[in-house]
Amino acid sequence: MATRWCLICGGEYIDTVDECPDCEVPLVDERPDQDLSDLGAGQVVYDLAEWAAESRVMLEQLLESEGVRRAWEGTTLVVPDVFEVRVDNLVEHVEVTTLPTLEPDAERVAYDVSDWTDDMVHELQRILDRGHVPYEFDAEGDIVTLSEHQERVESLMDAIELADEEPRAPGRVADADTSQVNSGDGHAPADDEAEDEGDGDDVGDTGDDAGTEQIDSSVVLSDLFVSTDRMMKSARDHRGVLTFASAADRVERMGTPYGFSRVAWQDICNQVSSIRALLEADDASDEDIQNGARDLRNTLREYV
């Protein structure tokens, strides 16, 4: 006869029973890994209704990684009392991690991510964290950022959604310290196409090697970091601007470097393009250039 178990007390019941009569939590089909029979059947209840959905997802992941036996009743978490101290610490960790990080009076923009997968949300969080872009989750589970970052966040979200909808195009994987020049569509040209495209349209090497130039991504990233570090202090720093312009040219001709996700690299490319547009505009303010340089430097700091 098939049986079911209670995650809290470990009790075993026939499969026609849906809820543990002692713990009043739903039964599961798999036997719990931990034997708590000698430790009593006490339980601790956490009412997390006021938490954002993302915060509950984060707690569930932490509980899973810690191997904590638990049951969810909607937004209420139930765990055996032997895990109380451990769960209290995890709850505190999530609460501290998700505390509001935005200035109270600053203009904000909220983005609905209810249709996103957990992986998509985590990718956005990871890139925002690396770029030191402040954000938080509201009570509805929407991600909220400052309006000054709206253009960048929207570009990131578009890239993440595109990456989720379309399979990655097959192609050559870049070497650990180099990135092959792309063909204008974000992907490196195939070997049999490279020779046909060496007719002067590519910037860089000329002659028989045109179209197959190898760009050292570590050098490009280093140049971008050094130049933006100078420009965030002085928008029109001569050496900074020249170094940045040279690195920006190479970025446009690169595919995604080894170790970067497509979305993270697209974010860097978008920032480079935005700064270049500001430098070329007659009416761009030094403050805008410095802010853009600071944001890009913060993003690159995790990679160089």
Image: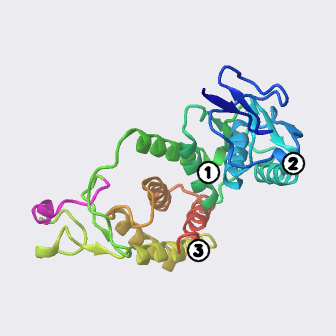
Residue 269: where, in percent of width, then height?
A: 44, 58
**Tags 1 and 2 in contact by the CB under 8 Å rule?**
no
Residue 132 figure quarter:
bottom right
Task: In the rendered view, tell whether residue 200 sits above or below residue 97.
Answer: below
Q: Is residue 236 left or right of residue 242?
A: right
The residue under label 3 is: 229
Q: Secondary structure at mark 2?
A: helix
Q: Is residue 241 above or below residue 70?
A: below
Identify the residue at image location x=54%, y=39%.
117
Q: Which dot marks residue 39?
A: 2
Image coordinates of residue 34 in percent, x first then y, are 73, 49
Whether the magenta-drawn stretch holds residue 194 is answered as yes
* CA gap, disc 3 and disc 1: 24 Å
Q: Which residues are magenta?
A: 186-198
Residue 228 falls in image quadrant: bottom right
Left or right, 41 with respect to 184, comes to: right
Q: Amino acid at mark 1?
A: Gln
Q: Residues within 10 Å of mark 1 (few under 14, many from 20)?
A: some
**Is residue 259 positioned above or below 171 on the image?**
below
- Element assignment for label 1: helix
Residue receiving disc 1: 125
Residue name at image x 70 percent, y 36 percent: 53
Return the disc, 3 or 2, that comes first in the chain's sequence.
2
Task: Name the mark nearer the viewer: 1 or 2.
Answer: 2
- The answer to whether residue 131 is seen in the rendering is no
Callout 3 environment at 10 Å: few (<14), some (14 to 19), or many (20+)? some
